[in-house]
Amino acid sequence: MKSTITYKVSLGKDSYCIFIGNKNLENITKYIPNYENYSKKILITDKKIIEKKKRLLRTELFNIVNYEMIVLPDGEKIKSFNYLQELIEKILKFGVDRNSLIICFGGGVLGDLVALAASLVLRGIDFVQIPSTLLAQVDSSVGGKTGINSKYGKNLIGTFKQPKSVIISIDILKTLDKREIISGYAEILKYSFIKDPSFFNWLKLNGKKVISLDPSSCIYAVKKSCSIKSNIVSKDEKETGIREILNFGHTFGHAIESMTGYSNKIKHGESIFIGMYLAIKFSIFLNLCKQTVLESYEEHLNEIGIKYRLKQYNFKFDPKTFQKHIKFDKKVKKDKIKFILLKKIGHPVRLFLEDEKLLTKFLKYELK
Ligand SMILES: NC(=O)c1ccc[n+]([C@@H]2O[C@H](COP(=O)([O-])OP(=O)(O)OC[C@H]3O[C@@H](n4cnc5c(N)ncnc54)[C@H](O)[C@@H]3O)[C@@H](O)[C@H]2O)c1
């Protein structure tokens, strides 16, 4: 399959294109605007990717782009001040100027860190994203959020920085672990639940094909996800309104990641499956939503064999600690926790919880 879909994210002077296809890296220079004008190109990736993609990154792609390369460790731990400093110093050591280009080849972790560095070095230099995980292709590479973590919560330090383009090539996902593919599927499913019931119906029929990386099913799911996300981002780049619906499942999910120390015990997407499950259950608990929504969610995930309950991970959290970590998440306004809940599939609702005791009661019941 060769045809490439171009999707424009409209953000005025910061608009950019997402190129979605299979084997897109063979023509990479076509997808980098004003490619010839860059004086220096620096490709940043991580150790695990370089192991899996040695030939591509050291020879094939290098022969086309001729970049300097920086390789960082992999894993959520690099989203920290220490690694941000290390990365920025490595970039500066190459003698970058305002005409330099940073190319980020990696998953969401690397993308968040590199985008933050690109927004800070020389007060901002150009960068393009080559997202190499399913999660990064459908979510983190689109929308311009950068971030590192703090002991007080996830992604609490960051900026907004839009890339010059996002180049998505389905074939590079082949070396991904199964858990990573499933993690990406969480965000795909999220888009269908917050915005598009017909996409959910499509996923019920084709979800297994997406997870097995069938190219045309993946291209469709990635395109649909990017179009839903970029439509929302175009309306609300800085998350002051509608963009908040993208956080469906994330208030509970981030608390789980924070309680497990951002470790390999649970991947970001895995925690989002549990987070969406809890958000739907909380919606039902507050009488906002019908039980049938939960049944549809469970049926679909059971059918494709994805875990979405805390018990399936053998996690045991104390309700008080859970609530404390929910409050650490940045979705708190005037001391009221903000939740994105569901009325029905495709109809999210934003709720500032007036009475926190309701959450206490819900968590006590759910975690017993
Ligand atoms: N900025 C945003 O809008 C946004 C949105 C969603 C998630 N995120 C962030 O994304 C992060 C999660 O990203 P992720 O799920 O991509 O995890 P990740 O970046 O940690 O990548 C997962 C693992 O896969 C490896 N890998 C990457 N590409 C590979 C490939 N093609 N073949 C083999 N291995 C490969 C990586 O080295 C890593 O070990 C979280 O930190 C989350 O907060 C950000």
Image (cartoon, rainbow, N blue to C red):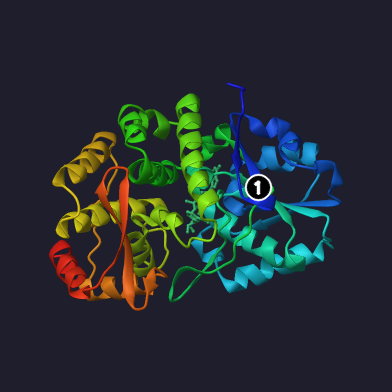
Query: Quarter of the image containing the N terminus?
Result: top right
Q: Residue at x 43, y 55 (%)?
A: 242
Across the whole image, how many numbered discs are drawn on residues? 1
**Left or right of 142: which side holds 129?**
right
Q: Residue lying at the far top in this picture: please name it.
A: 1
Q: Which residue is mark 1?
A: 15
Relative side of 72 to 69, left or right: left
Query: Can residue 333 be spotted in the picture?
Result: yes
Check disc 1: other Cα within 10 Å, few if <14, some if 14-19, many if 20+: some
Q: Position of residue 265 (x, y in %)?
A: 36, 59
- Residue 112: image quadrant is bottom right
Q: Quadrant of residue 361?
A: bottom left
**For this view, does 308 lie left or right of residue 101?**
left
- Where is 296 relative to 3, above or below? below
Q: Is residue 193 left or right of residue 126?
A: left
Assign a secondary structure to mark 1: loop
Residue 18, horizontal then vertical, whole percent = 61, 40
Q: Is mark 1 within 8 Å of ligand 1?
A: no
Of 342 and 32, the residue lying toward us: 342
Residue 27 versus residue 79 in the image, above or below? above
Residue at image coords 45%, 55%: 243
Residue 313 visible in this rendered orientation of the protein: no
Q: Residue furthest bottom?
A: 335
Residue 189, given in percent of the width and then of the height, sits at 36, 42
